[in-house]
């Protein structure tokens, strides 16, 4: 079993729809949870960063962490074609080494 | 956000040759840099952790004599792929963090290596 599970998709939605992404994990020591966006042939870009359980909102993006269920989510409201990318969840404990999910490829259709 | 650069952005080399990839933190001092490898449609796999002034720590299954890492300054780490073979063809990405990044990692744009 992988330490971090993420459905690779692909996920295709019409412009304006809500994109819902999620990951599950097995290591209860993880305390820091991140979502990265990666465009083709580019390095990952940090989107959201959450410590422990709870919700965090930044513009059209909302990140949720439920440590009791070992489940994290990212929601993108009013999706735009420019949101088309691969979204990677990542998490770590105090060791600073990140464990990544497989990434979900999202296409927002105009 | 903090900026990390990589050079070159892509490289093609012949089998058996060595290739050096540079990772630089442009606007902060990086106490630690990480090197990842990413195959097509797969996630990032950590290869090694590099702390300034000390030897790199390699992940299980990564050959340290094949992937030489040097972190000689707080703004530069290099990865040298020695005696490259076609199976080493991949997308290599570095990340860096330091006190000013609140210890969160920022990623470089990646280097695409193709070994013929």
Image (cartoon, coloured by chain):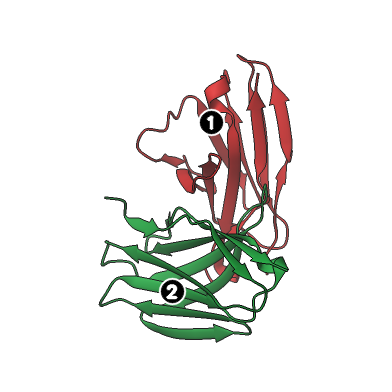
Give the total number of marks visible in the rendering. 2
Check disc 2 and report its element: helix, strand or loop: strand
- The front one of A34 and B74 is A34
The residue carrying mark 2 is: A73
- The front one of B42 and A92 is B42
Residue B45 image point, x, y percent: 46, 45
Q: From this viewpoint, is residue A58 visible?
A: yes
Asked if residue A90 is positioned above or below residue A78 in the image, the reply reads: above
> What residue appears at the point 58 percent right and 27 percent down from the top-left corner?
B81
Asked if residue B74 is positioned above or below residue B99 in the image, the reply reads: above
The residue carrying mark 1 is: B68
Residue A18 image point, x, y percent: 56, 78
Where is residue A57, by image quadrant? bottom right
- The front one of A77 and A41 is A77
Identify the subunit bearing mark 1: B
Q: Residues within 10 Å of mark 2 (few under 14, many from 20)?
A: some
> What residue appears at the point 66 percent right and 37 percent down from the top-left corner?
B112
Tell me the shade of chain B.
red
Quick check: A26 left or right of A88? left
Q: From this viewpoint, is residue A93 visible?
A: no
Q: Nearer the viewer, mark 2 or mark 1?
A: 2
Residue A91 image point, x, y percent: 41, 64
Chain ID, green in image = A
> What residue appears at the point 56 percent right and 40 percent down from the top-left corner?
B40
- Label ID, residue A110: none
Separation of marks 2 and 1 at Cα, in angstroms: 37 Å
């Amino acid at each position: 079993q992988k330490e971090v599970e993420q459905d690779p998709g692909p996920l295709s939605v019409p412009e304006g729809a809500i994109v819902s992404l999620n990951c599950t994990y097995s290591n209860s020591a993880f305390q820091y949870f991140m979502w990265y966006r990666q465009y083709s042939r580019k390095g990952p870009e940090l989107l959201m960063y959450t410590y422990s359980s709870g919700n965090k909102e930044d513009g059209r993006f909302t990140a949720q962490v439920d440590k009791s269920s070992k489940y994290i989510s990212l929601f993108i409201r009013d999706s735009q074609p420019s949101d088309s990318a691969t979204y990677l969840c990542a998490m770590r404990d105090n060791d600073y080494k990140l464990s990544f999910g497989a990434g979900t490829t999202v296409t927002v259709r105009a | 956000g903090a900026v990390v650069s990589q050079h070159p952005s892509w490289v093609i080399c012949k089998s058996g040759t060595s290739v050096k990839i540079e990772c630089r933190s442009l606007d902060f001092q990086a106490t630690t840099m990480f090197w990842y490898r990413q195959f097509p449609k797969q996630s990032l796999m950590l290869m090694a952790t590099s702390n300034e002034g000390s030897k790199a720590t390699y992940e299980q299954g990564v050959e340290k004599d094949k992937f030489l890492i040097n972190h000689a300054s707080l703004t530069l780490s290099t990865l040298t792929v020695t005696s490259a073979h076609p199976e080493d063809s991949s997308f290599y990405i570095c990340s860096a963090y330091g006190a000013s990044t609140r210890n969160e990692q920022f990623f470089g744009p990646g280097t695409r290596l193709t070994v013929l």
